Amino acid sequence: MDMKKWFADTIAAERKKALPVLSFPAVQLMGISVKDLIESSDYQAEAMVRVAERVDSGASVSFMDLSVEAEAFGSQIRVTDDEVPTVLGSLIDEATDPDIIIVPEVGTGRTGLYLEAVRTCAPKIEDRPVLAGVIGPFSLAGRLMDVSEVMVLCYEEPELVHAVLDKCAGFLIAYARAFKEAGADGVVMAEPLAGLLSPDLCGEFSAPYVKRIVDAVQSDEFAVVYHNCGGGAVAQIAQILQAGAMGYHFGNAIDMADVMPHIPAGVIAMGNVDPAGQLRNGTPESVRTATLELMEKCAQYPNFVPSTGCDVPPLSPWKNIDAFFAAVEEYYAR
């Protein structure tokens, strides 16, 4: 698909199709657990097709599983039936020689399952782009080094952090290229940990590595959408935009109306109804209210696309998800 044209057409359209990060709630449609889903490429492909059939979204977005790349490097993960997997402990500390860190082959662990899922479902979803999911470089480094520890090491051992980031970026370039070969039209790169950095630290430890990945994989036919759900995103916006991604996705820790004036007119920005507070734990009425409030503040910008602030939790009631889509339609129908 010509993604450069798709982004331009989306900006030009008077009505935007909602584009939430929606995949894991497919477990409810399929009668399976999250554990079943993440361990089967067939289930993952079916889930993406089921969601695409269920909702008229702007794109089909794959799973935001931020454990899969760290697991490929060797991290231990915790898997439950109802929640997205999480990383346990750390692989790398301040005593680690970065030269001994082995960069895994793409396909190691569950990365192969996610690639095969996209390869299977992409030919079946023909009416919208298929966007795969990858973690961002600093967020991957944080999972390998421990989320809290990496913040300290940015000050105490910056050379080590840069060495780890270099290896993370190299792997993520190869992984994104493999998704392109598998038939994806782009990737959503989730860099949530960078949202906790100061603008200066973001400019040193995240933005250059994100840009390196974008420069290596983005083309007219393959888009990168950068996701940052941290509260520091508005303060970091100059550093974030250096990546040159076709699109940006922001979490509900910020007010979307604060970030939209900073986004270039030819670049799409998406966000940011609270997925946990509203989609998972709200009601159809509260979801409608939150969505309409977002639209009132941001739909004036032609490059704004309504979305959730992050991925929709697996057990979010479908009546709430339906209410989100209905509220977007209601706004445009006025």
Image (cartoon, helix red, strand yellow):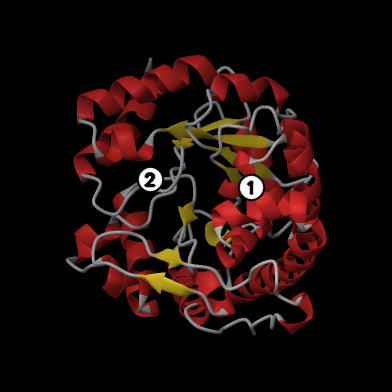
Residue 226 vs 52, above or below: the answer is above
Figure quadrant of residue 157: bottom right
Q: Is residue 319 left or right of 302 when viewed as pictured?
A: left
The residue that label 1 is drawn on is 226
Crowding at label 2, few (<14), some or many (≥20) Cα neighbours within 10 Å? some
Crowding at label 1, few (<14), some or many (≥20) Cα neighbours within 10 Å? many
Whether residue 224 is visible to the viewer of this picture, yes or no, is: no
Q: CA distance from mark 1 to mark 2?
A: 22 Å
Please state the horizontal and vertical placement of residue 69, each as a whole percent of the image.
Answer: 56, 71
Figure quadrant of residue 90: bottom right
Residue 130 vs 114, above or below: the answer is above
Q: Is residue 146 left or right of 239 when viewed as pictured?
A: left
Check disc 1 and report its element: helix, strand or loop.
strand
Residue 41 vs 333, above or below: the answer is below
- Label 2 sits on what residue type? Asp
Whether residue 58 is visible to the viewer of this picture, yes or no, is: yes
Residue 302 or 224: which is nearer the viewer?
224
Please state the horizontal and vertical placement of residue 314, each as a whole percent of the image.
Answer: 29, 54
Residue 117 or 220: which is nearer the viewer?
117
What residue lies at 54% left-to-right and 62% top-to-bottom?
A: 132
Quadrant the C terminus occupies:
top left
Residue 15 vs 163, above or below: the answer is above
What residue lies at 57% left-to-right and 19% top-to-bottom?
A: 257
Residue 56, disc: 2
Which mark is first along the chain, 2 or 1? Answer: 2
Please state the horizontal and vertical placement of residue 273, each as a whole percent of the image.
Answer: 41, 32
- Label 1 sits on what residue type? Tyr
